[in-house]
Amino acid sequence: MVRIGIDDSSRHLEVLSALDRAKTQWYHFTAIVIAGLGFFTDAYDLFCISTVLRLLGRLYYYDPTTSHPGTLPPNVSAAVNSVALCGTLAGQLFFGWLGDKMAEKKSMVPL
């Protein structure tokens, strides 16, 4: 068990003040890009699912007798949406657990 005393809190303040004084380096831009790409790849399917639903309706539910493009039936649209959300949830849980297990030793180094 780690106890935070006066020495530990002053050490943490020194570390935080050193971070405040640090100049922006290439590492900071790399960290921002990696975090942005992580968000993009995680949420891309949720952002584009509405476009995919329209395309699926036009491709598989097109009625040639009318001039209107086809649309997905409500139950099919709900099923595709729910599969996308369940896949996102399962991926976040699994890859979050995997990331914790693989990076636990590297990120739990004491200051």
Image (tube, grey):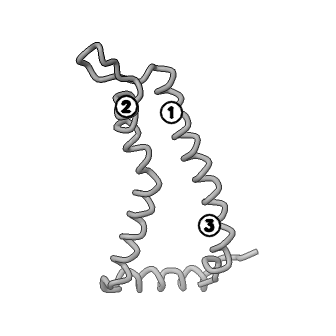
Secondary structure at badge 3 equals helix
Q: CA distance from mark 1 to mark 2?
A: 15 Å
Q: Which residue is mark 2?
A: 59
Numbered mark located on residue 99 in the image: 3
Across and down, in percent, residue 4 comes to 65, 77
In the image, 32 versus 24, the foreground residue is 32
Viewer-nearest of discs 3 and 1? 1
Q: Quadrant of residue 2?
A: bottom right
| Left or right relative to 27: residue 42 | right
Q: Which residue is mark 1?
A: 80
Secondary structure at badge 1 equals helix
Across and down, in percent, residue 31 comes to 40, 74
Callout 3: few (<14), some (14-19), or many (20+) C-alpha neighbours within 10 Å? few
For image coordinates 23% across by 17% down, the residue present is 67
For image coordinates 41% across by 50% down, the residue present is 44
For image coordinates 34% across by 29% down, the residue present is 58
Secondary structure at badge 2 equals helix
In the image, 29 versus 73, the foreground residue is 73
Residue type pointed to by label 3: Gly
For image coordinates 44% across by 57% down, the residue present is 41
Residue type pointed to by label 2: Leu
Q: CA distance from mark 2 to mark 3?
A: 38 Å
